[in-house]
Amino acid sequence: MSNKEPVAGYIPELKALKARLNVFVKMRWLVVLGIVAVAMAAKYLFNISFSIYPVFVICLFLLAYNLWMFMWNRRLAQDDTELVIKRAQASGYIQVLLDLAVLTVLLHFTGGITNPFVFVYVIHTTAASILLTKRRAYELTTIAVAMAALLAFLEISGIIGHVNLVGFVPVTLYHQANFVWSVIVTLAVLTYTSTYITTAVAGELRLQHLKMDLLRDQLLKEDELELQRISAEVTRLKDEKTSFIRLLNVVTHDLQAPLVAVQSCISYVLDGYAGEVVEEQKSWLQRGSRRIDSLLLLITDLLDIPRIELGQLKPEMAELSLNDVITNSLAGLDILAEKKGLKFLVELPVKSPVIFGSSRRLQQVVTNLTNNAINYTENGEIKLVLSETDDDVRFEVIDTGIGVPPKDIPRLFDEFYRGSNVESKGSGLGLSIARRIITAHGGKIWAESPVPETGRGSKFVFIIPKNQNK
Amino acid sequence: MSKILIIDDDVDLVAVEKAVLQREGYKVVIAGNGEEGLSQARKEKPDLIILDIVMPVMDGYLFADQFNKDASISKIPVVALTSYVESPLDQPVPFEVVEYVSKPIKPKDLVVLVNKYLKKT
């Protein structure tokens, strides 16, 4: 992995570390204020005699180095590389080490270990225990105790000077071995105990963090696998669908081709190309021809059902003008109606409704409904009405024909279902295909008989929402 | 005498169409697939092509690709005859002059259709 790779799994731990480093920088600003305040109070309020200038110099140094740490932390915040944790921990280690040194120097100028602030070392070692690894924490704890002991040793042995806090502790206190030893031992006990407790808690927290990270990674991985599995499944189903539709197309073609050839041969004879055909011959040939026609229709209709069910309409869908769809569907039908002596009325809105759909399939529905109306109406009129509301478009075919018996209405749109009062005509699939086409457009289709307004005939209605799921 | 090229793999259908059109006084040339159709079109320079869409070796779509690229034949009007319900509207064959007619077509209707494109000589 390159250094630029983000360390995804350790972000929470890293965030915590960065936040903690920032807390220490903030605390240090306050500590500087505290040192100045305490030193001034000690000197001027309690009249303890010691030189305050070294304290100010140390504070200045502390300010400067905290500024540096502040900048360092900001750089760390933008660091996204794998090494960032190591860098942050190094920063923490250096900060604690410097803080220990500053504290030791400060103590030296303010009474050495007779200054009760000598126990401030505990704060430093606790900080180290929170920030750093167990080993580093104990290392720094040992350094802290060693620094205090070294300070005491150097001052007592006279290698460096000792500042007496005159007015606060007796000058002789420094030479009482049991006092010095008790301070050092107490400090050691305090610092090591604090480090032990803190590292134990921090270690536990770190472990929980790690477990959570692992768990999260595992969950993410499982999610990803599940997603891959589903997407593979979807692809497989799509492939299956595509090959099934291809098969259907081949089946349709191969079933129809021989029938088409037979029909052409019969037509050749019927149309007189093979010599004169007498009436009786003609009527037998016509019988055969009609059966072939209905078989061709049945094949088309039967194979239409899976095509529509498999969503083959979707690629055909586009914005379309319904007035055009209806006009195109009626070619020849008006003539058929007039031949039967029926009045044929078409009511279209002035401005055509526009919907998203398959023009060819909707034409198929309109043709089917209109054809049925003409077939089952002996006299009167056929009326087609297209209208629209804000939400949907509505198409009605109203006839004055034989109507549909109430018991047949619920099953009218089932495959091969025929009204009990009609002769077999067509494939018996027309309405079930119409229902599928309208459903594929998000719409509804139904029949009413007798027509509520006139009390006779039947009315077939479909509505299609204008805002369907595209 | 106008010349018509029929490209179709169904021999019985071709036989009917050929007989009808010959009776109407047309010269009829036949090809069993798109590939043969192309070479016949180049050789015979027909006045009209009657084309089936679903054929072995080279179907109507592949035929259209090659046909359109060849300027010497691409202006010939094409009537696409098809029993393949999906073809004409799903993927229109991209001919310059084309008419779709679904099979079966009655001999009389075939004659009317052909006469629309060709003046008898």
Image (spheres, coloured by chain):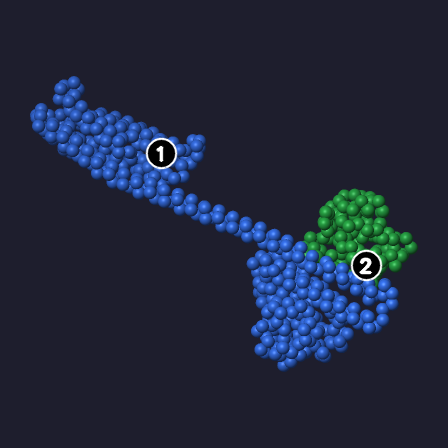
Image quadrant in which you'd find residue A89 = top left
Q: Is residue A129 visible?
A: yes
What's the residue at 65%, 78% (across, down)? Answer: A421
Image quadrant in which you'd find residue A309 = bottom right
Foreground: A287 or A240? A287
- Amino acid type of the residue that numbered disc 1 sits on in the rendered structure: Ile
Percent position (x, y) of residue A110?
17, 27
Chain B painted colour: green
Whether residue A34 is situated above or below residue A456 in the rendered picture:
above
Which chain is in blue here?
A: A
Whether residue A151 is situated above or below residue A458 in the rendered picture:
above
Q: Which mark is residue A85?
A: 1
Count of labels in the image:
2
Q: Quadrant of the C terminus of chain A?
A: bottom right
What's the residue at 81%, 59% (across, down)? Answer: B16
Residue at numbered disc 2: B16
Query: Which of the two marks, 1 or 2, is nearer to us in this view?
Result: 2
Marked residue chain, label 1: A
Q: Is residue A399 left or right of residue A190?
A: right
Foreground: A98 or A434? A434
